[in-house]
């Protein structure tokens, strides 16, 4: 509260978008309509280079939503060089919901290939009830969880770089890459 | 070992003729309490166990589950078990349990072991393997109601959690307890741990976990590793934790019968069995505050030949 009796909001000059955050769909999204009932689907001021745009996948070829994350046993690509951490989580895996796994005939421990418009990885399948099939705007969506710790040589078993799959698209202000939501396909190897 | 040798109350494949050392009287029964409702599955306990005990297992494989190494081995003495359980209303719970030796009050491994002194029980409740005495027969594996001991492929000896007997002997908590970042593992006297568990169970019940309770199974005389379970009414949900673990009748039978028959043979051969039993009996009467829990029934009855046989049957 300021002396004139109202609040003020300060924002740094130079923000491309803001100061209030707005929700848009990820650049790669299976939702074909606009975000939250709006007509605009993507952030209109995002920096999109033609080469990167050409590497974006379509839900027809890549129907599943993927996200990348870390697991407690490993820290980024650092602790894979430590024997004890490697023992705790020795080999690359992806997490697949039990309903999607059932549909694709994938059992826990099977080797699967996860591909996006940008490349593919192969990893063991951890089939889990924790990744639920979602219902978004009447559309059934399956999610795939991709921990990113393997790839590069280390004490763990050989693996693929999870960022082979992720899109080169940044947040409009911070350029933080959009590695938390993108489209993939999953096949049993 | 050293001073710890004076705290041994049971010794595998050893008959009841020789009484356990009794001079020292200060040993308290200890217990580790694992509160599964506080566990986040970080596996810090697994790493701490490997660090303290200088264990380095193989860098294994992912077999489609979070559990890694995928099972207990001679180089992995504790493993976090991850189980996804859905109740009737499809509510999903990810149940975690730190699996390892339960340090039974009535240890099936010790009972089954045919090698003298390969398995010891200390006055504080810790059950420990003496690897130099182990003959690798695997009877302890068959005798354990929790499926814990593992035989090494390298040296053919059995291994399991020691409850960090070396740390406890010098007044420290086990390594897993020390490292647990959420305080899910506690260590102290068994009485203290039961009090702590009771408080925690009350709290969990107050938060709607009606099945919360302490896991201290009476079928093995209670354990020195206990769990606070949110579903104590259904312990099998936690990676097949047995609801009522008991020592297999086969193990009980072969051990008790063999002790019995040894005595029968001895009593036939020995010219004067009675003086021997009389000589031993007064020593048995010496009650030890801790040791008496396993010896009360032996020391109370009058000394007769029949009673001696019972003593033999109870002997380890």
Image (spheres, coloured by chain):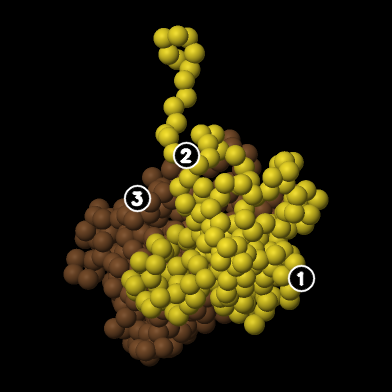
Chain colours: A yellow, B brown
Looking at the figure, which quarter contains the N terminus of chain B? bottom left
Query: How many circles with numbers are drawn on the protein?
Result: 3
Q: Nearer the viewer, mark 2 or mark 1?
A: 2
Q: Nearer the viewer, mark 2 or mark 3?
A: 2
* Quarter of image, res B305: bottom left
- Disc 2, SS: loop
Mark seen at residue A15: 2
- Count neighbours of disc 3 (C-alpha within 10 A) and say few if under 14, some if 14 to 19, many if 20 or more: some
* Cα separation between marks 3 and 1: 50 Å
Query: Is mark 3 in CB contact (under 8 Å) with mark 1?
Result: no
Which residue appears at 48% of the width and 72% of the height?
A: A161
Residue B114 position (above or below residue B246): below
What residue would you read off at disc 3? B188
Which residue appears at 44% of the width and 42% of the height?
A: B195
- Count neighbours of disc 1 (C-alpha within 10 A) and say few if under 14, some if 14 to 19, many if 20 or more: few
Residue B227 position (above or below residue B133): above
Q: Earlier in the sequence, mark 2 or mark 1?
A: 2
In the image: residue B24, left or right of residue A35: left
* Cα separation between marks 2 and 1: 45 Å
- Disc 3, SS: strand
**Which x, y percent locates residue B35?**
48, 51
Is residue A109 among the parts visible in the rendering? Answer: no
Residues marked 3 and 1, same chain:
no
Residue nearest the viewer, comparing A21 with B126: A21
Q: Chain of mark 1?
A: A
What residue would you read off at disc 1? A103
Mark seen at residue A65: none
Query: Is mark 2 in CB contact (under 8 Å) with mark 1?
Result: no
Residue nearest the viewer, comparing B75 with B308: B75
- Count neighbours of disc 2 (C-alpha within 10 A) and say few if under 14, some if 14 to 19, many if 20 or more: few
């Amino acid at each position: 509260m300021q002396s004139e009796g109202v609040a003020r909001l300060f924002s740094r000059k130079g923000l491309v978008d803001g100061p209030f955050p707005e929700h848009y769909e990820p650049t790669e999204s299976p939702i074909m309509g606009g975000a939250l009932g709006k007509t605009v689907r993507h952030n209109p001021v995002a920096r999109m280079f033609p080469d990167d745009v050409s590497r974006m996948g379509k839900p027809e070829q890549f129907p599943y939503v993927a996200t990348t994350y870390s697991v407690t046993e490993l820290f980024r690509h650092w602790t894979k060089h430590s024997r004890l951490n490697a023992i705790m989580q020795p080999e690359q895996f992806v997490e697949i919901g039990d309903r999607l796994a059932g549909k694709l005939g994938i059992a826990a421990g099977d080797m699967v290939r996860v591909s996006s418009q940008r490349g593919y990885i192969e990893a063991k399948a951890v089939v889990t009830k924790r990744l639920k099939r979602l219902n978004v705007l009447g559309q059934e969506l399956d999610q795939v969880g991709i921990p990113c710790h393997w790839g590069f040589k280390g004490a763990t078993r050989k693996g693929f770089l999870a960022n082979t799959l992720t899109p080169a698209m940044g947040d409009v202000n911070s350029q933080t890459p959009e590695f938390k939501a993108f489209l993939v396909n999953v096949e049993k190897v | 070992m050293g001073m710890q040798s004076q705290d041994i109350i049971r010794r595998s494949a050893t008959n009841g003729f020789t009484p356990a050392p009794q001079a020292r009287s200060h040993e308290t029964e200890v217990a580790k309490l694992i509160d599964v409702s506080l566990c986040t599955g970080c596996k810090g306990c697994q790493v701490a166990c490997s660090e303290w005990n200088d264990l380095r297992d193989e860098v294994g494989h992912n077999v489609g589950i979070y559990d890694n190494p995928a099972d207990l081995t001679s180089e992995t003495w504790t493993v976090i078990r991850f189980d996804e359980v859905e109740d009737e209303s499809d509510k999903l719970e990810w149940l975690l349990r730190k699996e390892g030796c339960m340090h039974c009050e009535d240890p099936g491994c010790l009972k089954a072991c045919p090698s003298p002194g390969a398995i010891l029980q200390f006055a504080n409740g810790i059950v420990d393997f003496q690897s130099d005495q182990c003959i690798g027969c695997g009877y302890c594996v068959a005798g354990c109601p929790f499926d814990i001991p593992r035989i090494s492929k390298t040296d053919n000896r059995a291994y399991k959690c020691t409850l960090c007997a070396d740390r406890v002997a010098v007044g420290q908590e086990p390594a897993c307890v020390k490292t647990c970042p959420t305080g899910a593992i506690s260590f102290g006297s068994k009485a203290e741990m039961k009090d702590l568990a009771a408080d925690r169970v009350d709290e969990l019940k107050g938060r709607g976990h009606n099945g919360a309770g302490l896991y201290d199974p009476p079928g093995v005389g209670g354990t020195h590793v206990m769990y606070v379970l949110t579903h104590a009414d259904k312990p099998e949900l936690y990676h097949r934790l047995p609801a009522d673990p008991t020592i297999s009748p086969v193990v009980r039978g072969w051990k008790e019968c063999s002790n019995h028959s040894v005595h029968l043979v001895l009593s036939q051969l020995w010219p004067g069995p009675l003086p021997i039993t009389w000589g031993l009996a007064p020593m048995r009467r010496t009650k030890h505050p801790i040791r008496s829990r396993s010896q009360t029934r032996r020391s109370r009855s009058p000394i007769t030949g029949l009673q001696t046989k019972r003593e033999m049957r109870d002997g380890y």
